[in-house]
Image: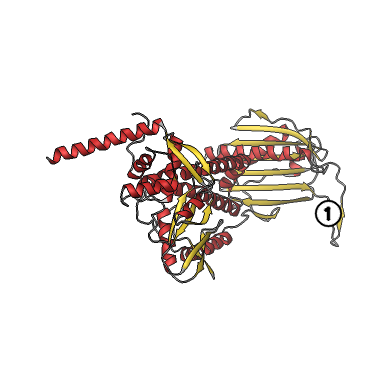
Amino acid sequence: MTEKHWLPCSRYDIQGLQSWLDEMALQGKFFQRFSRLIESAQFVTDTPCLVRYRLDPVGKGKQEDLPDLYAQMGWALVDTLPRMYCVYSCQDPDAPELHSDPATLAYALNSTIQQQTRFWTAMTAASILFLGGVFSLIGKRLLEELILMEQPRDLFQFAFSLAVFVIVTIRPIREIRQLVKVRRTLAPKAGRRWNRARDLKVYFCITVPLLLVLYFAIPSYRPQVCGLGEAPLSHTWPTLAQLEAAGPRPLEEEPEVDGYLKRSHSWLVPVQEFQSMDWSRTVRTDPGELIEIPRPYPLQVYIQYDRARSPGTARLVYQLRRDREVRQLNAVLSYDNPLSRVSDLQPFQTREYPGLDALETVRFRRGGQERWLFTALRGNDILVVEYAGPTALENCLPLFLEALGKEN
Amino acid sequence: MAGREKGPLTEPMYYVLMSFLRRERCGTEITGFVEEKTQGRVKLGPGTLYTLLAKFQEEGLIAETGVDGRKRTYRITDKGLAVFQEELERLRACVTDGEEERQ
Protein backbone atom coordinates (compact mmCIF):
# COMPACT_ATOMS: atom_id res chain seq x y z
CA MET A 1 0.00 0.00 0.00
CA THR A 2 1.26 3.48 -0.77
CA GLU A 3 0.81 6.69 1.18
CA LYS A 4 1.58 10.30 0.42
CA HIS A 5 2.95 12.69 3.00
CA TRP A 6 3.78 16.37 2.82
CA LEU A 7 7.43 17.15 3.27
CA PRO A 8 7.87 18.43 6.83
CA CYS A 9 10.73 20.74 5.86
CA SER A 10 12.27 22.35 2.83
CA ARG A 11 13.52 20.16 -0.02
CA TYR A 12 16.82 21.93 0.46
CA ASP A 13 17.14 20.87 4.08
CA ILE A 14 19.20 17.75 3.50
CA GLN A 15 19.64 16.77 7.14
CA GLY A 16 15.98 17.41 7.89
CA LEU A 17 14.78 15.22 5.02
CA GLN A 18 17.23 12.44 5.81
CA SER A 19 16.18 12.16 9.45
CA TRP A 20 12.49 12.35 8.47
CA LEU A 21 12.85 9.51 5.94
CA ASP A 22 14.72 7.44 8.56
CA GLU A 23 11.93 8.01 11.08
CA MET A 24 9.26 7.11 8.53
CA ALA A 25 11.06 3.81 7.86
CA LEU A 26 10.95 3.04 11.58
CA GLN A 27 7.17 3.53 11.33
CA GLY A 28 6.98 1.08 8.43
CA LYS A 29 6.73 3.74 5.72
CA PHE A 30 9.45 3.35 3.13
CA PHE A 31 10.22 6.20 0.83
CA GLN A 32 9.57 5.64 -2.88
CA ARG A 33 9.74 8.97 -4.61
CA PHE A 34 9.26 12.70 -4.35
CA SER A 35 6.41 14.41 -6.13
CA ARG A 36 7.79 16.58 -8.91
CA LEU A 37 5.15 19.29 -8.70
CA ILE A 38 4.09 19.54 -5.09
CA GLU A 39 6.14 19.15 -1.98
CA SER A 40 5.14 15.64 -1.02
CA ALA A 41 6.68 12.18 -0.96
CA GLN A 42 5.24 8.77 -1.69
CA PHE A 43 5.82 5.86 0.69
CA VAL A 44 5.08 2.17 0.61
CA THR A 45 4.02 0.59 3.88
CA ASP A 46 5.63 -2.58 5.22
CA THR A 47 7.09 -4.01 8.42
CA PRO A 48 9.04 -1.30 10.26
CA CYS A 49 12.80 -1.70 10.14
CA LEU A 50 15.97 0.33 10.31
CA VAL A 51 16.74 1.90 6.94
CA ARG A 52 19.08 4.81 6.39
CA TYR A 53 18.21 7.32 3.70
CA ARG A 54 20.86 9.69 2.46
CA LEU A 55 20.78 12.47 -0.11
CA ASP A 56 23.68 12.65 -2.53
CA PRO A 57 23.99 16.01 -4.29
CA VAL A 58 24.18 15.80 -8.05
CA GLY A 59 27.34 17.28 -9.43
CA LYS A 60 29.46 17.66 -12.47
CA GLY A 61 32.16 15.11 -13.08
CA LYS A 62 30.28 12.35 -11.36
CA GLN A 63 30.13 9.06 -13.17
CA GLU A 64 26.89 7.96 -14.78
CA ASP A 65 27.22 4.48 -13.29
CA LEU A 66 27.47 5.78 -9.73
CA PRO A 67 24.28 3.99 -8.62
CA ASP A 68 25.91 0.64 -9.50
CA LEU A 69 29.10 1.57 -7.70
CA TYR A 70 27.15 2.75 -4.66
CA ALA A 71 25.13 -0.48 -4.77
CA GLN A 72 28.37 -2.46 -4.41
CA MET A 73 28.86 -0.65 -1.11
CA GLY A 74 25.32 -1.27 0.14
CA TRP A 75 23.54 1.89 -1.02
CA ALA A 76 20.59 1.54 -3.41
CA LEU A 77 19.24 4.38 -5.50
CA VAL A 78 15.62 5.18 -4.65
CA ASP A 79 14.80 8.41 -6.44
CA THR A 80 16.43 11.36 -8.19
CA LEU A 81 15.45 15.00 -8.06
CA PRO A 82 16.88 16.62 -11.18
CA ARG A 83 19.47 19.33 -10.53
CA MET A 84 19.34 18.61 -6.79
CA TYR A 85 20.19 15.19 -5.43
CA CYS A 86 19.74 11.44 -5.56
CA VAL A 87 18.18 9.60 -2.66
CA TYR A 88 19.94 6.39 -1.61
CA SER A 89 18.86 3.90 1.01
CA CYS A 90 20.83 1.33 2.96
CA GLN A 91 19.59 -1.51 5.15
CA ASP A 92 23.03 -2.68 6.22
CA PRO A 93 23.85 -1.07 9.58
CA ASP A 94 27.57 -1.85 9.09
CA ALA A 95 27.85 -0.06 5.75
CA PRO A 96 29.72 3.25 6.02
CA GLU A 97 27.82 6.48 5.79
CA LEU A 98 27.20 7.65 2.22
CA HIS A 99 29.15 10.80 2.96
CA SER A 100 31.67 10.16 5.70
CA ASP A 101 33.52 13.45 5.20
CA PRO A 102 31.60 16.71 5.76
CA ALA A 103 34.15 18.70 3.74
CA THR A 104 33.63 16.43 0.74
CA LEU A 105 29.87 16.70 1.12
CA ALA A 106 30.26 20.49 1.15
CA TYR A 107 32.23 20.23 -2.07
CA ALA A 108 29.53 18.00 -3.58
CA LEU A 109 26.91 20.54 -2.60
CA ASN A 110 28.75 23.24 -4.55
CA SER A 111 27.57 21.87 -7.86
CA THR A 112 23.99 21.58 -6.68
CA ILE A 113 24.06 25.14 -5.35
CA GLN A 114 25.60 26.40 -8.58
CA GLN A 115 23.03 24.60 -10.69
CA GLN A 116 20.15 25.78 -8.53
CA THR A 117 21.53 29.31 -8.43
CA ARG A 118 21.92 29.39 -12.21
CA PHE A 119 18.44 28.00 -12.74
CA TRP A 120 16.72 30.38 -10.31
CA THR A 121 18.80 33.35 -11.43
CA ALA A 122 17.62 32.70 -14.97
CA MET A 123 14.05 32.31 -13.71
CA THR A 124 14.28 35.52 -11.67
CA ALA A 125 15.78 37.42 -14.59
CA ALA A 126 13.02 36.11 -16.86
CA SER A 127 10.43 37.09 -14.25
CA ILE A 128 11.87 40.59 -13.92
CA LEU A 129 11.89 40.97 -17.70
CA PHE A 130 8.32 39.72 -17.85
CA LEU A 131 7.24 42.11 -15.10
CA GLY A 132 9.11 44.94 -16.83
CA GLY A 133 7.27 44.12 -20.05
CA VAL A 134 3.94 44.03 -18.26
CA PHE A 135 4.62 47.35 -16.55
CA SER A 136 5.74 48.99 -19.77
CA LEU A 137 2.48 47.87 -21.36
CA ILE A 138 0.04 48.64 -18.59
CA GLY A 139 2.07 50.81 -16.22
CA LYS A 140 0.26 54.01 -17.18
CA ARG A 141 -3.12 52.37 -16.89
CA LEU A 142 -2.15 51.03 -13.49
CA LEU A 143 -1.05 54.46 -12.32
CA GLU A 144 -4.25 55.94 -13.69
CA GLU A 145 -6.28 53.32 -11.89
CA LEU A 146 -4.35 53.86 -8.69
CA ILE A 147 -5.09 57.59 -8.78
CA LEU A 148 -8.66 57.50 -10.05
CA MET A 149 -9.76 54.21 -8.44
CA GLU A 150 -12.44 53.53 -11.02
CA GLN A 151 -12.04 49.75 -11.00
CA PRO A 152 -10.48 48.89 -7.64
CA ARG A 153 -11.15 45.17 -7.90
CA ASP A 154 -8.90 44.95 -10.94
CA LEU A 155 -6.26 46.78 -8.96
CA PHE A 156 -6.67 44.38 -6.05
CA GLN A 157 -6.42 41.37 -8.35
CA PHE A 158 -3.31 42.77 -9.95
CA ALA A 159 -1.72 43.54 -6.57
CA PHE A 160 -2.58 40.03 -5.36
CA SER A 161 -1.14 38.40 -8.50
CA LEU A 162 1.97 40.52 -8.19
CA ALA A 163 2.39 39.54 -4.54
CA VAL A 164 2.04 35.84 -5.39
CA PHE A 165 4.47 36.26 -8.26
CA VAL A 166 7.03 37.97 -6.04
CA ILE A 167 6.65 35.36 -3.29
CA VAL A 168 7.04 32.52 -5.77
CA THR A 169 10.18 34.18 -7.10
CA ILE A 170 11.67 35.03 -3.72
CA ARG A 171 11.04 31.63 -2.11
CA PRO A 172 13.69 29.72 -4.12
CA ILE A 173 16.22 32.43 -3.37
CA ARG A 174 15.53 31.96 0.33
CA GLU A 175 15.89 28.20 -0.01
CA ILE A 176 19.14 28.43 -1.94
CA ARG A 177 20.44 30.54 0.92
CA GLN A 178 19.46 27.67 3.20
CA LEU A 179 21.43 25.27 1.02
CA VAL A 180 24.45 27.54 1.23
CA LYS A 181 24.03 27.61 4.99
CA VAL A 182 23.93 23.81 5.04
CA ARG A 183 27.13 23.68 3.04
CA ARG A 184 28.81 26.18 5.33
CA THR A 185 27.86 24.59 8.61
CA LEU A 186 26.90 21.02 7.73
CA ALA A 187 25.21 20.97 11.10
CA PRO A 188 24.28 17.47 12.16
CA LYS A 189 20.94 18.58 13.55
CA ALA A 190 17.90 18.61 11.34
CA GLY A 191 16.26 21.85 10.30
CA ARG A 192 12.89 23.13 11.38
CA ARG A 193 10.01 20.86 10.59
CA TRP A 194 6.40 21.72 10.10
CA ASN A 195 3.13 19.95 9.62
CA ARG A 196 2.42 20.97 6.06
CA ALA A 197 -0.99 19.34 5.88
CA ARG A 198 -2.16 21.27 8.95
CA ASP A 199 -0.40 24.45 7.83
CA LEU A 200 -2.06 24.27 4.42
CA LYS A 201 -5.50 23.86 6.03
CA VAL A 202 -4.84 26.85 8.28
CA TYR A 203 -3.56 28.80 5.30
CA PHE A 204 -6.63 28.04 3.20
CA CYS A 205 -8.99 28.65 6.12
CA ILE A 206 -7.54 32.14 6.55
CA THR A 207 -6.67 33.26 3.05
CA VAL A 208 -9.61 31.92 1.04
CA PRO A 209 -12.34 33.60 3.17
CA LEU A 210 -10.21 36.73 3.35
CA LEU A 211 -9.80 36.77 -0.42
CA LEU A 212 -13.51 36.13 -0.97
CA VAL A 213 -14.52 38.89 1.46
CA LEU A 214 -12.07 41.30 -0.13
CA TYR A 215 -13.16 40.26 -3.60
CA PHE A 216 -16.83 40.90 -2.93
CA ALA A 217 -16.22 43.91 -0.68
CA ILE A 218 -14.18 45.68 -3.32
CA PRO A 219 -16.41 46.94 -6.11
CA SER A 220 -15.42 46.05 -9.62
CA TYR A 221 -16.61 49.41 -11.01
CA ARG A 222 -17.11 52.45 -8.81
CA PRO A 223 -18.39 55.23 -11.07
CA GLN A 224 -22.12 55.98 -10.87
CA VAL A 225 -23.79 56.25 -14.24
CA CYS A 226 -27.09 58.04 -14.71
CA GLY A 227 -29.05 60.04 -17.25
CA LEU A 228 -28.46 63.70 -18.02
CA GLY A 229 -29.88 65.92 -15.27
CA GLU A 230 -30.40 63.01 -12.88
CA ALA A 231 -27.44 63.99 -10.69
CA PRO A 232 -25.91 67.34 -9.81
CA LEU A 233 -22.61 68.25 -11.40
CA SER A 234 -19.94 70.49 -9.94
CA HIS A 235 -20.12 72.83 -12.95
CA THR A 236 -22.76 73.80 -15.49
CA TRP A 237 -21.13 73.15 -18.82
CA PRO A 238 -22.21 74.86 -22.05
CA THR A 239 -25.22 73.27 -23.74
CA LEU A 240 -25.29 72.24 -27.38
CA ALA A 241 -27.30 75.34 -28.26
CA GLN A 242 -24.88 77.61 -26.41
CA LEU A 243 -21.97 76.07 -28.24
CA GLU A 244 -23.80 76.51 -31.54
CA ALA A 245 -24.52 80.12 -30.66
CA ALA A 246 -20.80 80.71 -30.48
CA GLY A 247 -20.41 79.38 -33.98
CA PRO A 248 -21.74 80.08 -37.45
CA ARG A 249 -25.05 78.26 -37.11
CA PRO A 250 -26.82 79.29 -33.91
CA LEU A 251 -29.64 77.02 -32.84
CA GLU A 252 -32.85 78.73 -31.94
CA GLU A 253 -33.71 76.28 -29.22
CA GLU A 254 -31.97 73.52 -27.29
CA PRO A 255 -32.19 70.30 -29.28
CA GLU A 256 -33.33 67.01 -27.83
CA VAL A 257 -30.24 65.53 -26.31
CA ASP A 258 -29.18 61.95 -25.67
CA GLY A 259 -26.47 61.44 -23.13
CA TYR A 260 -25.40 60.30 -19.71
CA LEU A 261 -23.36 61.29 -16.70
CA LYS A 262 -20.67 59.32 -14.97
CA ARG A 263 -19.42 60.38 -11.56
CA SER A 264 -16.68 58.94 -9.47
CA HIS A 265 -14.19 59.96 -6.83
CA SER A 266 -10.98 58.90 -5.17
CA TRP A 267 -8.91 60.27 -2.35
CA LEU A 268 -6.43 61.87 -4.74
CA VAL A 269 -9.05 63.04 -7.21
CA PRO A 270 -12.23 63.74 -5.24
CA VAL A 271 -14.23 64.99 -8.25
CA GLN A 272 -14.36 62.96 -11.46
CA GLU A 273 -17.25 63.77 -13.80
CA PHE A 274 -17.96 62.74 -17.34
CA GLN A 275 -20.81 64.15 -19.41
CA SER A 276 -21.80 62.89 -22.83
CA MET A 277 -24.22 64.94 -24.93
CA ASP A 278 -25.39 63.90 -28.38
CA TRP A 279 -28.01 65.57 -30.56
CA SER A 280 -30.75 63.00 -30.34
CA ARG A 281 -31.64 61.03 -33.44
CA THR A 282 -35.07 60.26 -32.03
CA VAL A 283 -37.80 62.27 -30.35
CA ARG A 284 -40.61 60.87 -28.22
CA THR A 285 -43.98 62.30 -29.30
CA ASP A 286 -47.07 62.81 -27.13
CA PRO A 287 -48.61 59.40 -27.84
CA GLY A 288 -45.26 57.94 -26.86
CA GLU A 289 -43.93 57.10 -30.27
CA LEU A 290 -40.27 57.42 -31.14
CA ILE A 291 -39.65 59.35 -34.32
CA GLU A 292 -36.29 59.27 -36.04
CA ILE A 293 -35.15 62.74 -36.97
CA PRO A 294 -32.54 63.20 -39.65
CA ARG A 295 -29.91 65.52 -38.22
CA PRO A 296 -28.72 68.34 -40.42
CA TYR A 297 -25.20 68.01 -39.02
CA PRO A 298 -23.48 66.15 -36.17
CA LEU A 299 -23.48 67.64 -32.70
CA GLN A 300 -21.73 65.82 -29.92
CA VAL A 301 -19.80 66.88 -26.83
CA TYR A 302 -17.92 64.71 -24.36
CA ILE A 303 -16.69 66.50 -21.25
CA GLN A 304 -14.37 64.97 -18.68
CA TYR A 305 -13.76 67.12 -15.64
CA ASP A 306 -11.50 66.19 -12.71
CA ARG A 307 -10.51 68.09 -9.63
CA ALA A 308 -7.37 66.77 -7.94
CA ARG A 309 -6.36 67.28 -4.35
CA SER A 310 -3.18 69.15 -5.25
CA PRO A 311 -1.68 70.88 -8.30
CA GLY A 312 1.00 68.17 -8.52
CA THR A 313 -1.63 65.43 -8.69
CA ALA A 314 -3.60 67.52 -11.16
CA ARG A 315 -0.61 67.70 -13.47
CA LEU A 316 -0.20 63.93 -13.24
CA VAL A 317 -3.90 63.34 -13.92
CA TYR A 318 -3.74 65.80 -16.81
CA GLN A 319 -0.87 63.83 -18.31
CA LEU A 320 -2.67 60.52 -17.80
CA ARG A 321 -5.92 61.81 -19.32
CA ARG A 322 -4.06 63.27 -22.27
CA ASP A 323 -2.12 60.03 -22.79
CA ARG A 324 -5.33 58.06 -22.62
CA GLU A 325 -6.85 60.22 -25.37
CA VAL A 326 -3.73 59.75 -27.50
CA ARG A 327 -3.91 55.98 -26.94
CA GLN A 328 -7.59 55.79 -27.77
CA LEU A 329 -7.30 57.93 -30.88
CA ASN A 330 -4.40 55.89 -32.16
CA ALA A 331 -6.19 52.65 -31.33
CA VAL A 332 -9.19 53.47 -33.51
CA LEU A 333 -7.14 54.61 -36.49
CA SER A 334 -7.31 51.11 -37.92
CA TYR A 335 -10.92 50.27 -36.98
CA ASP A 336 -12.97 48.57 -39.67
CA ASN A 337 -16.18 50.23 -38.53
CA PRO A 338 -16.34 53.51 -40.55
CA LEU A 339 -18.49 55.15 -37.84
CA SER A 340 -15.82 54.63 -35.19
CA ARG A 341 -12.69 54.87 -37.29
CA VAL A 342 -10.50 57.92 -36.78
CA SER A 343 -8.75 59.45 -39.74
CA ASP A 344 -6.74 62.59 -40.52
CA LEU A 345 -5.40 62.60 -36.98
CA GLN A 346 -3.24 65.69 -36.51
CA PRO A 347 -0.47 65.83 -33.93
CA PHE A 348 -1.30 67.29 -30.52
CA GLN A 349 -0.49 71.01 -30.40
CA THR A 350 0.64 72.71 -27.23
CA ARG A 351 -0.85 76.15 -26.89
CA GLU A 352 -0.52 79.12 -24.59
CA TYR A 353 -3.76 80.45 -23.17
CA PRO A 354 -4.26 83.10 -20.51
CA GLY A 355 -5.16 81.63 -17.14
CA LEU A 356 -4.34 78.04 -18.10
CA ASP A 357 -1.34 76.07 -16.88
CA ALA A 358 -1.48 73.77 -19.91
CA LEU A 359 -3.53 73.49 -23.05
CA GLU A 360 -3.20 70.98 -25.86
CA THR A 361 -5.47 70.53 -28.85
CA VAL A 362 -5.89 68.02 -31.63
CA ARG A 363 -8.07 67.78 -34.72
CA PHE A 364 -9.25 64.63 -36.45
CA ARG A 365 -12.16 63.00 -38.25
CA ARG A 366 -14.28 60.27 -36.74
CA GLY A 367 -17.00 58.60 -38.76
CA GLY A 368 -16.37 61.13 -41.49
CA GLN A 369 -17.11 64.08 -39.13
CA GLU A 370 -14.71 66.88 -38.27
CA ARG A 371 -13.83 66.90 -34.56
CA TRP A 372 -11.54 68.63 -32.16
CA LEU A 373 -10.39 67.80 -28.68
CA PHE A 374 -8.65 69.86 -26.05
CA THR A 375 -7.05 69.03 -22.73
CA ALA A 376 -6.70 71.88 -20.25
CA LEU A 377 -5.12 72.23 -16.84
CA ARG A 378 -5.79 75.06 -14.42
CA GLY A 379 -4.61 74.71 -10.82
CA ASN A 380 -6.26 71.59 -9.47
CA ASP A 381 -8.74 71.35 -12.38
CA ILE A 382 -8.38 69.16 -15.44
CA LEU A 383 -10.78 69.47 -18.35
CA VAL A 384 -10.91 67.30 -21.46
CA VAL A 385 -13.49 68.10 -24.13
CA GLU A 386 -14.18 66.40 -27.44
CA TYR A 387 -16.55 68.14 -29.83
CA ALA A 388 -18.16 67.26 -33.15
CA GLY A 389 -20.02 70.12 -34.78
CA PRO A 390 -19.56 73.19 -36.88
CA THR A 391 -18.27 75.54 -34.15
CA ALA A 392 -14.55 76.19 -33.99
CA LEU A 393 -12.44 75.31 -30.97
CA GLU A 394 -11.42 78.95 -30.54
CA ASN A 395 -15.07 79.96 -30.14
CA CYS A 396 -16.00 77.19 -27.73
CA LEU A 397 -12.96 77.32 -25.48
CA PRO A 398 -13.92 80.59 -23.71
CA LEU A 399 -17.35 79.15 -22.90
CA PHE A 400 -15.82 76.11 -21.24
CA LEU A 401 -13.25 78.16 -19.35
CA GLU A 402 -15.95 80.52 -18.17
CA ALA A 403 -17.97 77.54 -16.94
CA LEU A 404 -14.86 76.14 -15.27
CA GLY A 405 -14.61 79.29 -13.17
CA LYS A 406 -18.18 79.04 -11.90
CA GLU A 407 -18.69 76.18 -9.53
CA ASN A 408 -22.24 75.15 -8.67
CA MET B 1 52.32 26.08 -2.29
CA ALA B 2 53.05 23.42 -4.85
CA GLY B 3 49.64 22.59 -6.20
CA ARG B 4 46.70 22.88 -3.88
CA GLU B 5 45.53 26.30 -2.77
CA LYS B 6 42.42 25.23 -0.89
CA GLY B 7 43.78 24.52 2.57
CA PRO B 8 44.78 21.33 4.33
CA LEU B 9 43.39 17.96 3.30
CA THR B 10 40.81 16.23 5.41
CA GLU B 11 41.63 12.75 6.65
CA PRO B 12 39.68 10.94 3.91
CA MET B 13 41.31 13.16 1.27
CA TYR B 14 44.73 12.45 2.68
CA TYR B 15 44.26 8.70 2.69
CA VAL B 16 42.70 8.60 -0.76
CA LEU B 17 45.73 10.42 -2.16
CA MET B 18 48.01 8.16 -0.16
CA SER B 19 46.38 5.08 -1.69
CA PHE B 20 47.83 5.98 -5.10
CA LEU B 21 51.46 6.34 -3.98
CA ARG B 22 52.49 2.78 -4.78
CA ARG B 23 50.17 1.91 -7.64
CA GLU B 24 47.08 2.69 -9.65
CA ARG B 25 43.82 1.80 -7.97
CA CYS B 26 40.09 1.61 -8.58
CA GLY B 27 37.34 2.66 -6.17
CA THR B 28 36.89 -0.56 -4.24
CA GLU B 29 40.64 -0.98 -3.91
CA ILE B 30 40.91 2.50 -2.44
CA THR B 31 38.21 1.75 0.13
CA GLY B 32 39.99 -1.49 1.08
CA PHE B 33 43.33 0.25 1.32
CA VAL B 34 42.05 3.05 3.56
CA GLU B 35 40.21 0.65 5.84
CA GLU B 36 43.23 -1.58 6.14
CA LYS B 37 45.70 1.25 6.58
CA THR B 38 43.67 2.95 9.30
CA GLN B 39 42.52 -0.33 10.82
CA GLY B 40 38.93 0.66 10.28
CA ARG B 41 39.28 4.09 11.87
CA VAL B 42 38.58 5.92 8.63
CA LYS B 43 35.65 4.56 6.66
CA LEU B 44 35.07 5.88 3.20
CA GLY B 45 31.44 6.12 2.22
CA PRO B 46 30.69 5.75 -1.48
CA GLY B 47 29.47 9.35 -1.70
CA THR B 48 32.71 10.61 -0.19
CA LEU B 49 34.91 8.33 -2.28
CA TYR B 50 33.41 9.09 -5.67
CA THR B 51 33.02 12.80 -4.93
CA LEU B 52 36.70 12.88 -3.98
CA LEU B 53 37.75 11.04 -7.10
CA ALA B 54 35.79 13.50 -9.24
CA LYS B 55 37.21 16.43 -7.31
CA PHE B 56 40.82 15.23 -7.47
CA GLN B 57 40.44 14.55 -11.14
CA GLU B 58 39.06 18.02 -11.71
CA GLU B 59 41.94 19.55 -9.74
CA GLY B 60 44.47 17.46 -11.64
CA LEU B 61 45.70 15.54 -8.59
CA ILE B 62 44.87 12.18 -10.13
CA ALA B 63 44.29 10.97 -13.68
CA GLU B 64 42.14 8.18 -15.02
CA THR B 65 44.24 5.41 -16.55
CA GLY B 66 41.70 2.84 -17.62
CA VAL B 67 38.06 1.85 -17.79
CA ASP B 68 36.95 -1.74 -17.65
CA GLY B 69 33.19 -1.85 -17.53
CA ARG B 70 32.26 -0.05 -14.34
CA LYS B 71 35.77 -0.30 -13.00
CA ARG B 72 37.84 2.85 -13.43
CA THR B 73 41.45 3.05 -12.34
CA TYR B 74 43.37 6.16 -11.46
CA ARG B 75 46.95 7.18 -10.86
CA ILE B 76 48.39 10.09 -8.94
CA THR B 77 49.87 12.99 -10.94
CA ASP B 78 52.94 15.09 -10.16
CA LYS B 79 50.67 17.78 -8.84
CA GLY B 80 48.95 15.21 -6.64
CA LEU B 81 52.31 14.03 -5.33
CA ALA B 82 53.30 17.59 -4.51
CA VAL B 83 50.04 18.18 -2.66
CA PHE B 84 50.46 14.96 -0.71
CA GLN B 85 54.04 15.86 0.18
CA GLU B 86 52.98 19.27 1.32
CA GLU B 87 50.27 17.80 3.52
CA LEU B 88 52.72 15.27 4.90
CA GLU B 89 55.10 18.06 5.92
CA ARG B 90 52.28 20.01 7.47
CA LEU B 91 51.20 17.02 9.54
CA ARG B 92 54.82 16.34 10.47
CA ALA B 93 55.18 19.90 11.65
CA CYS B 94 51.98 19.56 13.65
CA VAL B 95 53.29 16.43 15.35
CA THR B 96 56.69 18.04 16.02
CA ASP B 97 55.07 21.12 17.50
CA GLY B 98 52.88 19.01 19.74
CA GLU B 99 55.72 16.88 20.97
CA GLU B 100 57.93 19.86 21.64
CA GLU B 101 55.28 21.42 23.78
CA ARG B 102 54.62 18.19 25.66
CA GLN B 103 58.25 17.79 26.75
Depth check: B77 or A181 in front?
Answer: B77
Q: Residue under circle 1?
A: A283
Is residue A392 depicted above or below A44 in this figure? Answer: above
Q: Where residue A343 sits: x, y (%)?
A: 79, 35
Which quarter of the picture shows residue A385?
top right
Q: Where residue A332 sits: x, y (%)?
A: 75, 40
Which quarter of the picture shows residue A138?
top right
Q: Where residue A203 sits: x, y (%)?
A: 49, 62
Residue density around tag 1, few if under 14, some if 14–19, many if 20 or more, within 10 Å: some
Q: Where residue A71 sits: x, y (%)?
A: 48, 55
Q: Which chain does tag 1 point to?
A: A
Say which amino acid is labelled 1: Val
Q: Secondary structure at mark 1?
A: strand
Q: Is residue A405 visible?
A: no
Which quarter of the picture shows residue B98?
top left
Look at the image and tell me in which quarter the N terminus of chain A lies. bottom right
A196 displayed left or right of A236 = left
Depth check: A159 or B98 in front?
Answer: B98
Depth check: A321 or A171 in front?
Answer: A171
Depth check: A258 or B72 in front?
Answer: B72
